[in-house]
Amino acid sequence: MSKQLGISTKKVDDLSEWYTQVVTKAELADYAPVKGFIILRPYGNSIWERIRDLLDRRLKEAGHSNAYFPLLIPEGYLQKEATHFKGFTPEVFWVTQSGDNTLSERLAVRPTSETIVYEAYSRWIRSWRDLPLLINLWNSVVRSEITTTRPFLRTSEFLWQEGHTVHATKEDADSEVMMILEFYRQLIEDEMSIPVLLGYKSEKEKFKGALYTTTLEAMMPDGKAIQMGTSHNLGQNFSKPFEIKYLGKDEEMHYAWTTSWGVSWRLISAIIMLHGDEKGLVVPPQVAPIQVVLVPIYFKEEQSEAITAKTKALADALRKAGVETHADFRDQYTPGWKFNEWELKGVPLRIEVGPRDVQNKQCVLVRRDNSQELTVKDEEVVDRVKSCLQEIQRNLFARAKKALEASIQQVSDYEKFRNALAERGGFVRACWCGMSDCEEVIQNDTGATIRTLPLKDEQPFSNCVRCGKPATKVAYFARSY
């Protein structure tokens, strides 16, 4: 019955309630018995699989291999890297008992895998011939989320990928960080149609234990930013405590350089919020598990045979052309009900096949992004569908890009800075003195953090927006999820 009701809240009126309804009614996920955990339903999982496969292909082409490491991590491993451990301590779930027996050492339920991975790497790496070591993991991690939870966006357990690589030099590690950042950009912008700002995190905001962190930041309709992915150069901060050393060509022992990087199913939350509308989800074609849905329409039983045959023939032709296609032959639902359901699920393109279409050797295409209807001759369907999907992909990105650009405000005065965040949100481009104390005052005062510092330094256009001292950086501030 809930699916029949559709989305009852407008996105512009209550984004949070609208978002929850889209997640549950589009059957992406459901709530689990334990707070902060969700059940990933088949449709939601199929979108995650599309995202995973697109990224996995790039990683493998660049020489990375997938592996799996244990869920439980000895406390002593986390303590080896003090800064990293301190950063995660408040979020860790601990296992203290096995059956009726108390464990001699607490075991952390994986909050991230650096420590257990690098302990293994210290045993696997011996000489320069073993480098680079390029391993990626597809797994879940668990972090205690005690604030407001929201499916995909903020949960105690989430699916992600985390890459962990080892290199001989800082330059090699730097190249890895930037290559992965570009892979993420291609995934997020080119395939998910979500424009992002690329840059560095400040010292305060970087990953705990990293030499530096690069990031991709997107802006949502409510004026809050989402960190879409990060790529870190960990320097030798893990290789030294874990003794990851190699014998170099110079016959000397050297500490290696490591990187880590990851994206999570938070990407799905950005798709929902940025592209969705009053009818529900809108999935970009490149990550849509169903790109085209065909709906046969007949009002008399004698019409069904010809319409069904034509629908199957179109579906076969589209599949052979590489289009992810589903034909909805369910008799227990009306065509109108099916239209609403597939719009709710965000399928990019719908093809309607009725009696007139059989007679005229045509069909009707309906775009999900703008509801445009196109009447297409049968012999042109495959080509028109492919071009339509490309147009939808481009249109979603162009629309989101325009919204991103409109969300950026440049200010030089602190009062205007505060007002910009309070009234509109979005990204505020401002000059910063580079001092973490000033950064912290801004966060405490406004709730905004430095989301990114541009990859290429931009020329300061004023003194520091907060303290008035000479600025060293241009920063993009925003409140965030």
Image (cartoon, rainbow, N blue to C red):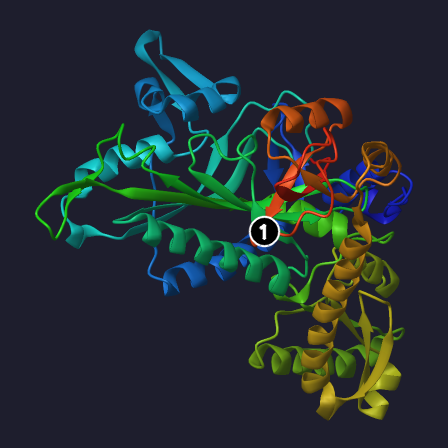
Farthest residue toward the left?
251
Question: What is the quadrant of residue 33 in the picture?
Answer: top right
Q: Residue at x 10, y 50 (%)?
A: 250
Most foreground residue, 334 or 276: 276
Query: Is 91 drawn above or below residue 183 in the view shown?
Result: above
Q: On the image, numbered disc 1 is attached to which residue?
A: 457
Task: State the quadrant of the C terminus.
Answer: top right
- Give left or right: position of 448 versus 416: left
Residue 15 screen position, x and y as percent: 83, 40
Q: Secondary structure at mark 1?
A: loop
Q: Is residue 24 visible?
A: yes
Label 1 Cα crowd, 10 Å radius (few <14 / some 14-19 / many 20+): few
Q: Is residue 152 visible?
A: no
Residue 154 screen position, x and y as percent: 64, 33
- Give left or right: position of 405 versus 476: right
Q: Residue at x 68, y 57 (%)?
A: 194
Most foreground residue, 126 or 46: 126
Most foreground residue, 108 or 367: 108
Task: State the quadrant of the N terminus.
Answer: top right
Q: Residue at x 57, y 28 (%)?
A: 156
Question: What is the quadrant of residue 360 in the picture?
Answer: bottom right
Q: Residue at x 86, y 82 (%)?
A: 355
Query: Is 237 drawn above or below residue 334 in the view shown?
Result: above
Residue 57 screen position, x and y as percent: 44, 63
Query: Is 295 drawn above or below residue 266 in the view shown?
Result: below
- Give left or right: position of 347 versus 370: left
- Give left or right: position of 263 versus 278: left
User: Which amino acid lies under the numbered mark 1 shown in the image of this protein?
Assistant: Asp
Residue 451 screen position, x and y as percent: 64, 40
